[in-house]
Amino acid sequence: MVITIDGPAGVGKTTTAKRLASKLGYQYLDTGAMYRAVTYFLRKNFIDISSEVHVKKMLDILNLELDFTSDDEIKVLLDNVDISTLIRSKEITSAVSEVSAIKAVREKMVKIQKDTAKNGNFIVEGRDIGTVVFPDAKYKFFLTADYDVRAQRRLEDFKRVNEELNVNKIKQDLTDRDQYDSSRKLSPLKQAKDAIVIDTSTCTIDDQVNQIFKHIERN
């Protein structure tokens, strides 16, 4: 079974999804990490992402693997090298929306996501999981939070990878990214009609996990 958790950056999707997966005994799939990995791969090879031909050629040789053997984290491997920390840099964060909007990238990632989750129980988090990737999922959740809270959470994320950024700049970046992601033609960020909305602005992670768990338990 697949449970989807969607929402914009900084609402607590990743940590919530990890803890919920642990609580339910499911595996956890971070689709955002996959798009970050592709972004890292294309930038590392100096590919002009406006050239669909070049992007498609690179996707044909993309050697991306997800290692689920660790209890703590999914390891993202590119050519057998762990890039899990590298893809969290502000450079990749600022570029990932544009790469994610490329049709060829989206099609390849969605195929991998569907293939990965078809034979198991997964908590899958992202931006279009309940609307595009797994529209028939039994349980769908959409997390939101106000911009000040999200910006502060994002600031802490950057600190963890030893990068500093002004909180007001982060807030503006989040606003811009939401606008970009929600208005793109291909797989926009939006709430599925049958998704349960959870505002995480004043929630602890435990609160978020317990709210979702109770919804599942009741059904």
Image (cartoon, helix red, strand yellow):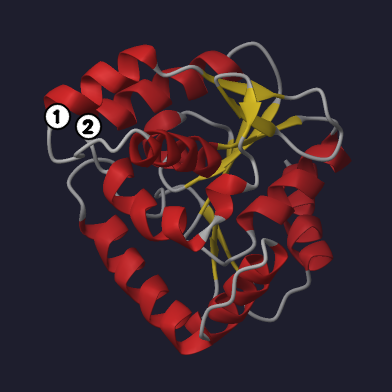
Query: Looking at the image, is 205 positioned above or below residue 209?
Result: below
Tell whether label 1 touches label 2 (CB within 8 Å): yes
Question: Amino acid type of disc 1?
Answer: Glu
| SS class, disc 2 | helix
Q: Residues within 10 Å of mark 1 (few under 14, many from 20)?
A: some
Q: Residues within 10 Å of mark 2 (few under 14, many from 20)?
A: some
The residue at the point 55 percent across, 19 percent down is: 79
Q: Which residue is mark 2?
A: 103
Q: Is residue 63 left or right of residue 24?
A: left
- Could you say where residue 60 lies in the image, as x and y percent from the top left? 32, 13
From where the camera sits, is residue 141 visible? no
Q: Which residue is mark 1?
A: 52
- Could you say where residue 87 lies in the image, as x and y percent from the top left? 54, 46
The residue at the point 35 percent across, 21 percent down is: 108
Say which label, 2 or 1, has the lower sequence index: 1
Figure quadrant of residue 116: top right
From where the camera sits, is residue 211 visible? yes
* CA distance for labels 2 and 1: 9 Å
Task: Look at the image and tell me in which quarter the N terminus lies.
Answer: top right
Figure quadrant of residue 173: bottom left
